[in-house]
Image: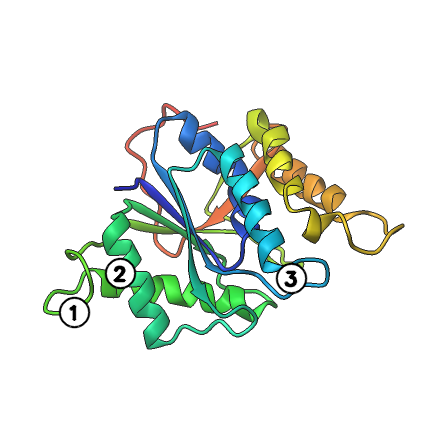
Amino acid sequence: MLDVLVVAPHPDDAELGMAGSILKLKQEGLRVGVLDLTSGEPTPHGSEEIRREETANATQLLQLDVRENLGLPNRSLKADLDSRYKLAGFIRRARPRWLFAPYWVDAHPDHVAAAELVEAARFWAKLSKTDLPGAPWHPERIFHYFSIHLRLAIQPAFVVDISQHWSQKLQTINCYQSQFAMGPRGESPTFLHQLESEASYWGKSIGTAHGEPFACKEPVGLSGFGRLI
């Protein structure tokens, strides 16, 4: 039984979008899992074997309680009934309190489909009188992390301070050498420089060194003000 399930379209999306927050959740004693929907392949410098090894290394650094792959097709991910059935079954097995999904607006069709799929599977997971495996379960919340290909001027629902975990987040991303260390040379700023600029921007927005933004379609409730920055 998990406290948090992060659903990622491809291996590396969870790390890009919220590795710092995952590490923070683990530090606070929560049980956290990641479900990659696809293998992420093909890519120019990767292979399924390479990506599995990279994902295993990143998983170890994140200290995840569970990480699995749903085996859906990369580049043609769809929020269809078969995929919904598989994801809803996993949710009923993992029984997370909170779901984290990609932001619902993006240039990458897989990311858009993943966001839609998570919402539909969350609803299906609570159904009775169904042949879905396990008992009905309804996660309390869906939060959306940002691992996007569009230059959006977003207004997040909240930003998490990841200053203490920034260097560890970079280590998890550096596990994916086939994706972030084998591209065109000489480009400036590099992808990792852009990533740090974004984290610094979100950190500045809340008065810290680094931050990760999150969206939510529903109001976010507080039981008190004790931990507000």
Q: Residues within 10 Å of mark 3 (few under 14, many from 20)?
A: few
Q: In which quarter of the image is the N terminus?
A: top left
Q: Which mark is residue 84?
A: none
Tell me which amino acid carries mark 1.
Asp
Q: Distance between the residues labelled 2 and 1?
A: 10 Å
> Going 83% across and 56% down the picture, which residue do you hit?
184
Residue drawn at (48%, 32%) of the image = 23
Q: Distance between the residues labelled 3 and 2?
A: 31 Å
Depicted 229 relative to depicted 179: above or below: above
Which of disc 2 and disc 3 is earlier in sequence? 2
Residue 38 percent coordinates (x, y) = 49, 62
Splitting the image into 4 quarters, where does residue 71 fall? bottom left
Q: For the residues carrying marks 1 and 3, which lies nearer the camera in this image?
A: 1
Callout 3 secondary element: loop
Q: In the rendering, at what x and y percent does residue 22 appear?
A: 46, 37
**Which residue does the numbered mark 3 point to in the structure image?**
150
Q: Can residue 150 be seen in this view?
A: yes
Q: Which residue is drawn at 71% across and 41% down?
A: 197
Residue 88 percent coordinates (x, y): 28, 62
Identify the residue under disc 1: 131
List the residue tagged with mark 2: 89
Which residue type carries mark 2? Gly
Q: Position of residue 163 (x, y in %)?
A: 58, 27
Amino acid tagged 3: Leu
Q: Point out the tag, 2 or 1, that comes first from the N-terminus.
A: 2
| Mark sitting earlier along the chain (1/3) | 1
Neighbour tally class for label 1: few under 14, some 14-19, many 20 plus, Cα within 10 Å = few
Number of other residues with Cα within 10 Å of mark 2, as a class: few under 14, some 14 to 19, many 20 or more = many
